Amino acid sequence: MKGSQAQPNQRIRFTGRFSNTIIRLNPTNLHSQFLILQLNCHNQKDTTLSALNNKQQHISLLFQEPWVYHHNFKPPTHQAWRRLTPITSPGTWAERPWTCIYICSFVPLKNITFSNTNSQNLTQVAIDILLKGISQKLTFFALYNPPRTFSGLQELEQRLSEMNTRLYPMVIAMDSNLLHQLWNPKNYHHQHPQARNILEICGRRDFKFISPKGEPTFMGASGSATTIDLTWANTIANKIISQCKVQLENHSSDHQPIISEFNIGGKAFEITETPISMNPSMLDKGKYINQLQYLSQPTKEGIEEIAKQLSNFLQNEYLSQGKYVKTRANKQKAWWDKKILMPIMKEGNRERKWMLLTRSGESKLAKRV
């Protein structure tokens, strides 16, 4: 491949492992021109972290199938990004989010609007920007359309039907898992009938296909390169997007990232810092000195005696709590009743210990009973 003019019959290049270097974005560069990146991370840790540590300065990352932590089933956090997930508290691995949007941490929090109607396959986030001096909500959609069921399209149609898609600039970044002649590589003729639904849903609501046509974005297991990652923008957004291209740096994913470059001709937003004003002469120094003297009064006991008392107190408090076993509702038997069976079980355990200690006939008889 050379630049963005990739040949359909060429293989997609894969890169190595990510760097641990933390990239600190410069807010002065996030003004008239900024980038967004969309990528299917294929549930890979290295891919997700590599994209988060990307050296290029993006205002937003739109992920499909991001890697998630195994203890809370959420995508990773990063000091340079604000993580916005469609499901705030997934309870199981099956409930993990299939999409996630990261917003650059230099974007003021007051400028970010997170939809409370997001679903597992769809994340919607809006950023307030200045477009020709007028505040506009630049809205991003990250969509994952599961293969076989293609349920993501139904969720997208429902969401767009509730909005005025001609009022604000909007961009849809999707892993469609669908093939169509509009975006298929040359000499690749297979099509999905469900792909027509994308054209109907997006075309009816003023969205246009802006990602490069015929440029491969996915390398299949058989080695065939197809185009299933798509970018759509409505008319207002299309006017401020200068280019949309497939990037060669794929962060070791089997998908290729798509970069959209925005050029709004002025500052997107004002980044202001509220100064903290403090007059040292207004501090009541005497008040703090008196409190310090009260808290640091001398004691008769030595430091070793105080440490011993503190250790004994902590140990006694720990032992007084007893030993608790974590119970899981899915592991319990339906017939188990704690109030009835726990006393019987404790009595049986006590008799068993008595039998093991004494080895007497009386204890063995009690155990049989």
Image (tube, helix red, strand yellow):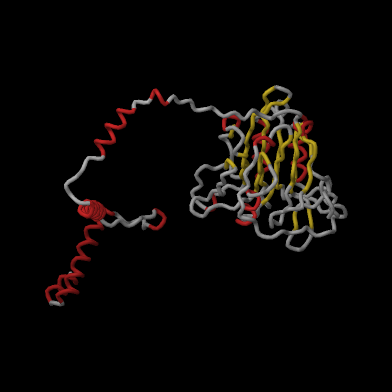
**95 to 348, vertically: above or below:** above
Image quarter in which the C terminus is found: bottom left
Q: Is residue 290 found left or right of 249 in the rendered image?
A: left
**185 to 200, vertically: above or below:** below
Q: Quadrant of residue 87?
A: top right
Q: Position of residue 17 (x, y in %)?
A: 66, 59
The residue nearer to you, when weighing 268 against 352, is 268
Q: Where is residue 117 in the image (x, y as percent from the top left)?
A: 57, 35
Q: Is residue 355 found left or right of 176 in the rendered image?
A: left
Q: Position of residue 101 (x, y in %)?
A: 62, 42
The residue nearer to you, when weighing 318 against 64, is 318
Q: Is residue 6 found left or right of 162 in the rendered image?
A: right
Residue 188 visible to the viewer = no
**31 to 312, vertically: above or below:** above
Tally of numbered tags: 0
Q: Where is residue 86 in the image (x, y as percent from the top left)?
A: 57, 41
Residue at image x 76%, y 33%? 263
Kindly give the residue lying farthest to the front in the view shown: 281
The residue nearer to you, when weighing 225 against 151, is 225
Residue at image x 71%, y 59%? 15
Residue at image x 86%, y 55%? 7
Residue 325 visible to the viewer = yes
Image quarter in which the N terminus is found: bottom right
Kindly give the residue lying farthest to the right in the view shown: 187
The residue nearer to you, when weighing 112 against 366, is 112
Q: Quadrant of residue 79?
A: top right
Q: Is residue 306 found left or right of 64 in the rendered image?
A: left
**159 to 19, vertically: above or below:** above
